[in-house]
Amino acid sequence: MRFFRDYIFDLDGTVYLGERALPGAVETIAELRRRGARCVFLSNKPIESVANYEAKLNRLGIPVEPGDVLNSSVVMARYLRRVAPNARVYLIGEEPLAEELVRAGIRLVTDPLETDYVVVSWDRQFTYRKLDDALQAILRGARFVATHPDRVCPVEGGVVADAAGMIAAVEAVTGKKCEEIVGKPSHWTVEVALERLGVPASDAIMVGDRLETDMRMGRAAGTATGLVLTGVTTREMVAEAADKPDYVLEGLRDLLAFE
């Protein structure tokens, strides 16, 4: 492991699990910063606001400033502002995502017949009505995009169902594939993170617990990749993977094992 000037950290399963920091996370990030590294934090999870993530990290002993934490809600807002700033959006998602979109000037609607974009996300109040509304909107020409592709989210004691289930349901009834997923591993997310750091991808390392999102995104963008085994990925899964991360870490403490 070499020292990098810029670190992009996943959160769930990498920095913390539930309401506790993972072993070594606080001390490791503090030491990297002491040595001059800059850090940003990414989460695909849109069921909390960025402000809540910032407050959580501060509470756990990892100080952050506004803009240091980015999630798929922020990336979706940026995406819609860029590609369709005047679009009428029907949202399958929870209140923090809705608030982020409204704050960005995105117009949310409840009538599927007046919809230009259907945005699908993790929604723990997902209903038949929402599914049918998405169907009617897409049948009438609405675009179909989503925040993130995660199948499950790690929690203390296991995992819970994530946004992939909602995306798959809409794909099943419409017969159409989701056109764009902006969260990890999309280039939309890594571009936001690198803009925050102000560096080219080659100067940074992506650290996370998922091969299919964190590591895939880092490789595609040109960052170094460090996979931690504190989340959903096991060493056996790494051994079977076609594309290996640059570093496999038992936990964040291994980031300090400098050559």
Image (cartoon, rainbow, N blue to C red):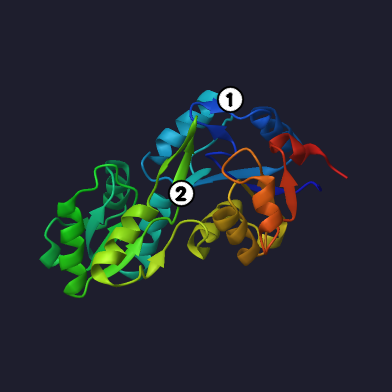
Q: Residue furthest bottom?
A: 141
Percent x, y for residue 199?
A: 65, 58
Label 2: state its secondary structure.
loop
Identity of the residue drawn at 65% across and 63% down: 219
Task: Look at the numbered discs 1 and 2 and tell me whether their residues touch, using CB distance below 8 Å.
Answer: no
Percent x, y for residue 107?
A: 21, 58
Label 1: state its secondary structure.
loop
Q: Is residue 158 visible?
A: yes
88 or 231: nearer the viewer: 231
Percent x, y for residue 79?
A: 39, 63
228 or 205: nearer the viewer: 228
Identity of the residue drawn at 54% across and 61% down: 191
Q: Amino acid at mark 2?
A: Asn
Q: Quadrant of residue 249?
A: top right
Image position of 31 (left or right of 96):
right
Marker disc for residue 61: 1
Identity of the residue drawn at 69% across and 46% down: 235
Q: Quadrant of residue 131?
A: bottom left
Image height of 149 relative to 94, above or below: below
Identity of the residue drawn at 58% across and 60% down: 217
Image height of 115 relative to 162, above or below: below
Q: Nearer the viewer, mark 1 or mark 2?
A: 2
Residue linked to disc 2: 44
123 or 53: nearer the viewer: 123
The local crowd at label 2, few if under 14, some if 14 to 19, many if 20 or more residues have their Cα within 10 Å, is many
Q: Amino acid at mark 1?
A: Gly
